Each structure stands twice: as structure tokens, then as C-alpha cells.
Image: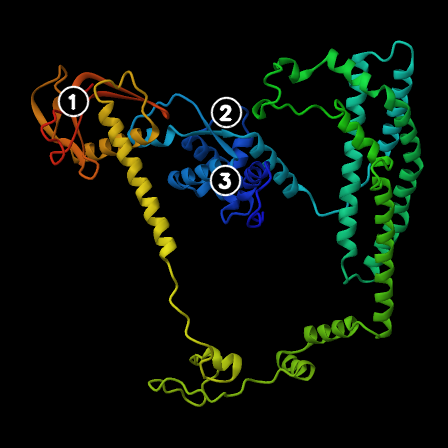
């Protein structure tokens, strides 16, 4: 999407349009096959949020491009799909046996509505064969009959029963949508075929019969039934608003559960079934009759058929000129290709020289390196390669042209990188301040994601630096007891220090926006580093 011109303000819906278009980005990314495999895993579930181990197991079960992904790469793919809007963060209680498992399992994802719709359309495009689709002409007759019967029932005394009206309208619009889709697909295929200029006589004969017979039957049927459908719609149109109101009073669908205050909110918008709103009927009427001065779809169908016949005539003229040798050299090129196919290797070289003037390579006067002695009988095919300067190869001269380019200014990029580093440092400092301010009352506070991530980082470093010491005594079964010695970690830049003690029966519960973390038999001590303590006492958290 192009950026707005300088000095102009974007439309109010531009941000929403960009967000929706970003959801298509995974189909053109370099890792598109892996993204599609991941999206198919989520499309195979209903209202289920999956963590990295769940998705990894299903990918390996299904096989294909996503089966070789490891946990770290899959996590990066899931996070990217969430940023594009194809996935949403899920909420689920996490049970993990280690910190690594907790970090991977706490992030659970579920399919967004937009992501499901895009993946469904993509699978439909990949599954369809590149062939002509038959036009469902019989559905047009059903649409005509359904409209005529509906108009008769609406104009009768007492009107139509609401349930009967709902069934007839739903059936009518399903039939019309299928017919319109088949028309569009068929004419898109027809335009793709007529754009070719390499049709031979057999292909041309087949497409000629397709156009003259099948397309003619389609246009005649549409031209015959369009006035009848327009007449039925004109008869039904005055009674349509009252009919839609009766249907809404009978069955409001999802709208029945919405309050008047929530109907206008974006998160509670409801897409009605086809035929339940007046705009759907206006689109149906505009397909068969000219209501806005821009022409109906029937008129466009007639024009498209005329253009197809003109393209067919142009192909016929080209084939006639090709037969007489007036324009195309197709016949000559086919004969030359047959000669190449039947010739021996040496004869094929002679034919190429005679037809295209492709003679053998000639010396250009560029000597090889002085330390390389190449015998005169060495073939150019296996001999060393001589580097030819670009200027000599393109212009035939070694002289430098133009002025020397100035050094590129990277100050803007450096400033952006410095600003990003400052933001990251400020975020980590705020997380450290949050941990120190929340010390001693972790049961009553809810940590942010940044604070919990910093705490897990310090905890992993402390446990990695821990040393086990054997204590006196043993358990009842004779198992020796071990304790943690010097299990601590600190960050001098942030001025925070974490000390871990192993205490039997201790339970430390941390609440955060990403879930709850329960540490058994561990007691945490959070304080300032020695450089910033200034006599401040450490605080024990258990």
C-alpha cells in the first residue's frame, strides 16, 4: 500500500485496512510454506489455544515443511504470525517442570477470525485445478422461480409466514451466490486462455467451439431470464422493507443477544446472513438491471462475450498470417527445432552457426595471471577463467567514468539504533525498579511481563552459578541431602541482586500478566548490589 502524499491526512479507515492487509504477509514471506503449515494446524482446531510443544507435535505428525522446525524457530514463527494478526494470545494455566518449559508454554496462541478466513481462502486457491469451471445455469432458473413465488406469497392477504420467508430467502441467495461465482470463474479462465498467442490449430478449434457453443448458451439463458427476474424484483420491492422487519422480529440471530449500546462497537459487530438486509437485495437487483447508471452485470456479461469473440477473431487472423508466412515465423521455428532434435552434436553446432551466427569464442587480448602457464592445447572449457573488468565488458574501455561516490551517511540509522538501545535499557531499569518495589508483598501484586522476564533471567543465572553442598544426615531411605551454596546473580547496571536459598517446604508464588509461577522449596532474596546498596537491607521473599 502506498504511503499518503506529504501534507495529506490518511483516511480514518487506513489503519484498519493496513492491519487487515498485514495478515496476508505470511503468504509472501520467505518462510511461507512453514507459516502455511502452522496455520493449517490452528485451522484444524476449534476454540483451542496451543502452546509451542503442542504445535510442534502436530507439525511432526502431519509432516511436510514444518516438520523440521525446532522449538526456538517455531516460537519465532508464532510470534511473527501474532504480530501480523493471524494468531491471538491465549490464556491458559501453565504447568511446567522447568523454567525453559515454562517460558515456552506460557505463550499460548489461538486462531484469529481474520487469520482463519485468509488461510481458508489460501487453501482453496491451492486446491483448485487450473481448469474451466462450468457455469451453473440451472441455478438461474431456480433464482427466477424463487423470486416469483416469494413475490406472490408476499402480496397475498396476510403475507408470508416468517419461517417460510427465512427459508426461501436463504435458499435464494445461496443459489444466486453460487451462480455469480461460477460466472466470474469461467470468464476469468476464458480471459486467461484468450491472452495466449501460441494456440495451434487443435487448441484453436477447441476454444472456438467453447466460445461459439457454450458461451452463447450462457448469454442466451441470462438474457432470457434477466427481464423475468427484474420484473419479479420490481413486484417484490415495495413490500421488501416490511418483510425484512417481520423476519427480524421473528428471528434476530446474533443481534438478539446484543444490547443497543454494544451494537456499534467494533468488537461486537455482527455480519448478517445474506438476504437479511436491504443492501443485499440492492446488489441482487443491480446484477440484473441498471439501477445506478453504471450498467448491470448482465450488460457487462454481454460486453465480455463480445470481447472474447473479438479475441478469437484476432487469433484466427494470426493463424492465417502464420500459414501464409506473412508475419509469424512459428512454422519456420518449429522446423528448425525439429532439425536440432534430429541432428548429431557436431551437426547441431553447424546448424546453430548457420541459423543464428553463433561462432566459436575468440581471444580478446586479456592475458592471464603471470604465475599461470596455460599450454596452447588447453580447452577453453576446462581452462582457467580470466576476469574481465566490467567497464571493458560493457563499454570496451578501461577508463573510469563519473565522479567518485561520496561516503554514505549512516547518522540516521545510528541514531535509531541508539534510541532503541535507550528504550530497552529504560524498560529493563523500570522492570528492576518494579521488582525492588514489589519485594516482600509478591502475593498482593501482579508483575508485568518485563519484570517477570527479568526475574526469570536472574533466577536462571543464579541456579546456573549454584554449587551443591552435601549436608550432614540423610533422609529416611538413606538418600543424602544436598543444599544450595552461593546461588546468587546480580546485574550491576540495573543495581539489582537475587539470592536463592533452598528451604524445605517453602513455596514462592509470583503473579504476572503472563501467568503464575510457583517455586517449590526455593526462597528468593531481592536487594540492591553492593555498589548501590548504600546500607540498604535486603528483603526476603518467600
Q: Is residue 22 left or right of residue 469?
A: right
Residue designated by label 1: 539
Q: Position of residue 83 (x, y in %)?
A: 47, 37
Q: Position of residue 107 (x, y in %)?
A: 40, 30
Cα separation, mark 1 vs mark 2, equals: 41 Å
Q: Is residue 461 left or right of residue 400?
A: left
Q: Is residue 237 above or below residue 159?
A: below
The C terminus sits in image quarter? top left
Q: Is residue 71 visible?
A: yes
Cα separation, mark 1 vs mark 3, equals: 51 Å
Which sits in the foreground, 456 or 362? 456
Q: Is residue 79 above or below residue 201?
A: above
Q: Earlier in the sequence, mark 1 or mark 2?
A: 2
Pair 1/2: label in front: 1
Residue designated by label 2: 48
Q: Secondary structure at mark 3?
A: loop
At 77% from the left and 23% from the top, the residue drawn is 170
Answer whether labels 2 and 3 touch (C-beta < 8 Å): no
Q: Secondary structure at mark 2?
A: loop
Pair 2/3: label in front: 2
Q: Is residue 142 left or right of residue 362?
A: right
Residue designated by label 3: 63
Which sits in the foreground, 353 or 277? 277
Amino acid at each position: 500500500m502506498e504511503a499518503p502524499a506529504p501534507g495529506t491526512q490518511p483516511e480514518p479507515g487506513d489503519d484498519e485496512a493496513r492491519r487487515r492487509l498485514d495478515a496476508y504477509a505470511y503468504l509472501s514471506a520467505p518462510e511461507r510454506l512453514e507459516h502455511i503449515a502452522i496455520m493449517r494446524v490452528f485451522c484444524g482446531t476449534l476454540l483451542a489455544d496451543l502452546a509451542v510443544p503442542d504445535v510442534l507435535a502436530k507439525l511432526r505428525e502431519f509432516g511436510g515443511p514444518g516438520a523440521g522446525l525446532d522449538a526456538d524457530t517455531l516460537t519465532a514463527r508464532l510470534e511473527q504470525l501474532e504480530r501480523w494478526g493471524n494468531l491471538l494470545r491465549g490464556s491458559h494455566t501453565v504447568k511446567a517442570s522447568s523454567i525453559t518449559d515454562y517460558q515456552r508454554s506460557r505463550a499460548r496462541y489461538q486462531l484469529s477470525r481474520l487469520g482463519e478466513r485468509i488461510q481458508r481462502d489460501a487453501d482453496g486457491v491451492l486446491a483448485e485445478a487450473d481448469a474451466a469451471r462450468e457455469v451453473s445455469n440451472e441455478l438461474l432458473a431456480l433464482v427466477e422461480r424463487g423470486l416469483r413465488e416469494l413475490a406472490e406469497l408476499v402480496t397475498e392477504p396476510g403475507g408470508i409466514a416468517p419461517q417460510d420467508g427465512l427459508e426461501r430467502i436463504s435458499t435464494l441467495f445461496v443459489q444466486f451466490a453460487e451462480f455469480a461465482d461460477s460466472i466470474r470463474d469461467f470468464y476469468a479462465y476464458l480471459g486467461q486462455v484468450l491472452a495466449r498467442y501460441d494456440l495451434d490449430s487443435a487448441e484453436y478449434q477447441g476454444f472456438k467451439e467453447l466460445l461459439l457453443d457454450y458461451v452463447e448458451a450462457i448469454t442466451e439463458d441470462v438474457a432470457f431470464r434477466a427481464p423475468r427476474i427484474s420484473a419479479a424484483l420490481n413486484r417484490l420491492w415495495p413490500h421488501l422493507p416490511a418483510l425484512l422487519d417481520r423476519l427480524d422480529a421473528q428471528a434476530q440471530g446474533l443481534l438478539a443477544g446484543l444490547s443497543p449500546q454494544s451494537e456499534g462497537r467494533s468488537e461486537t459487530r455482527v455480519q448478517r446472513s445474506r438476504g437479511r438486509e436491504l443492501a443485499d437485495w440492492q446488489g441482487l437487483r443491480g446484477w440484473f438491471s441498471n439501477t445506478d447508471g453504471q450498467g448491470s452485470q448482465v450488460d457487462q456479461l454481454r460486453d465480455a462475450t463480445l470481447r472474447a469473440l473479438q479475441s478469437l477473431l484476432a487469433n484466427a487472423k494470426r493463424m492465417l498470417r502464420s500459414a501464409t508466412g506473412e508475419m509469424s515465423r512459428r512454422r519456420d521455428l518449429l522446423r528448425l527445432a525439429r532439425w536440432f532434435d534430429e541432428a548429431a552434436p557436431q551437426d547441431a553446432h553447424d546448424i546453430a552457426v548457420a541459423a543464428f551466427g553463433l561462432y566459436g569464442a575468440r581471444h580478446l587480448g586479456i592475458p592471464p595471471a603471470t604465475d599461470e602457464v596455460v599450454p596452447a592445447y588447453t580447452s577453453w572449457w576446462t581452462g582457467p577463467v580470466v576476469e574481465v573488468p566490467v567497464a571493458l565488458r560493457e563499454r570496451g574501455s578501461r577508463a573510469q567514468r563519473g565522479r567518485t561516490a561520496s561516503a554514505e551517511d549512516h547518522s540516521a540509522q545510528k541514531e535509531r539504533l541508539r534510541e532503541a538501545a535507550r528504550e530497552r535499557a529504560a524498560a529493563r531499569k523500570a522492570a528492576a525498579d518494579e521488582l525492588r518495589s514489589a519485594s516482600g508483598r509478591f502475593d498482593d501484586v501482579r508483575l508485568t511481563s518485563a519484570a517477570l522476564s527479568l526475574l526469570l533471567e536472574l533466577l536462571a543465572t543464579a541456579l546456573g552459578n549454584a554449587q551443591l553442598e552435601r549436608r550432614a544426615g540423610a533422609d529416611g531411605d538413606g538418600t543424602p541431602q544436598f543444599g544450595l551454596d552461593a546461588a546468587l546473580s546480580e546485574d550491576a547496571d540495573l543495581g539489582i541482586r537475587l539470592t536463592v536459598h533452598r528451604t524445605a517446604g517453602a513455596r514462592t508464588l509470583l503473579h504476572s500478566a503472563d501467568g503464575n509461577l510457583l517455586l517449590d522449596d526455593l526462597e528468593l532474596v531481592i536487594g540492591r548490589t553492593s555498589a548501590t546498596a548504600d546500607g540498604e537491607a535486603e528483603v526476603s521473599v518467600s
